[in-house]
Image (spheres, coloured by chain):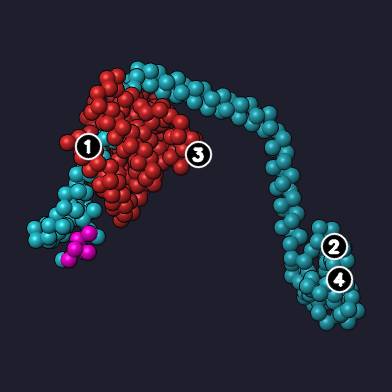
Amino acid sequence: MSQTPAETEIISKAMNGDRQAFRWIVEHHQRFVYAVGYKILGNRVEAEDIAQETFVRLWKNLSKYRSDVKLTTWLYKIATNLCLDHLRSSRHKILLRTVAPDEAVTSQESSDQQVMATEFSEAVRIFAASLQPRQRAVFVLREVEGLSVKEVSDILSMSSDLIKSNLYHARMQITKWMKEHYSEKKGTQT
Amino acid sequence: MNCKQFEKQIYLFKELSAAEQKKLSEHMQSCPKCLVLYTNINESVSVFSEQLSAVPHHDESKLTVRVMDAMRAKTASTSQWKDALEIMMAALRPGMTVAAILLAGFFVMEVTRTPHRINSSEGLTGSVKLDRTMTAGLAAQWLDTRSKAGTSTLHCIHECQKINGKTCIECLSNN
């Protein structure tokens, strides 16, 4: 997502306290901020809370904004670090045990295939939650969001070696888990 | 390259240089077991990522309103704090001025009473750590008294608290 001249102008207006300009930023970027939160946390309510807090922090710190950094990179940074803090908190662990699957993985219709797909999605979500917070965040940013190692390293303020180490462990655990569960699923589908 | 080396590197295939990737690819061509591992990793990561990328819908306008409300509340509470701080500062300003003057006076007094090297009237010198009640003049007198009494050391030695078997004035006053 590159920054257009119009967007740069809107950001500078927001930096000068223009709330309408800031509202535009919220409307324009909230979908991806919420999505990042959901992909890391796996919970809709928590992802909305993270998105809200991300924009409030952006507003508070907008005066420190440097135009050489893309706004999206900054938003990724705030949102991901909020997610990591949240994952380490006990509140998230309690929610994870009590919250029902989100709408994306539940369907009104209930054919056998849909039930299986829903169960598989839920199993993936639960397994993703069992990964270490850093591994999960690195995996989401690199594999799901498609960012480069350098971008992930900037967002998480971690060295490239540490990013690679987390990626290595995440991919290895996921491959092992998928071998046990996905091959079963493929087997039952045929 | 052997299978062990391959297994160590294959999980970071995408992050390797072109030359390293080429080495791994060459090994896979001659090793079916490693080719299967590579295929498994790719498929697993791809399917898993696809599942994680499914995001449920959220009410965008509601979230915008939430953000703008939270922002307003934050700004209001910040300005309330600022106002309260300004009122408090205005109320405390006269008191703080007096306190600053007193503190400066105390500091000047402390500086003048810190350990000094004093010349006694007989031309003897010694170091005396002044306590709060002892002025530079009193210390000079103390040095004179000690020298007249035949005291060879004029230093106030606080480690032993004695000078030639007698407790020094400062240590006496401190006790």
Instruction: Tell me residue B24's x, y (percent).
Output: 14, 59
Q: Nearer the viewer, residue B110 or B148?
A: B110
For the N terminus of chain A, the image quarter is top left
Letter of the chain shown red in the rendering = A
Q: Are marks 2 and 3 on the same chain?
A: no
Letter of the chain shown cyan in the rendering = B
Chain for mark 2? B
Q: What residue is disc 2 on?
A: B174
- Does the rendering let one see residue A166? yes
Q: Residue at x 23, y 53 (%)?
A: B11
- Marks 2 and 1, how far apart at CA: 90 Å
Q: Do labels 2 and 4 share a chain?
A: yes
Give the amino acid at mark 3.
Ser
Q: Give the range drawn in magenta.
A: B2-7
Residue B79 is marked as none
Give the amino acid at mark 2.
Asn
Q: What residue is disc 4 on?
A: B168
Q: Does the magenta stretch include residue A60?
A: no
Q: How many other residues sit within 10 Å of disc 2, few (<14), some (14-19) or many (≥20)?
A: few
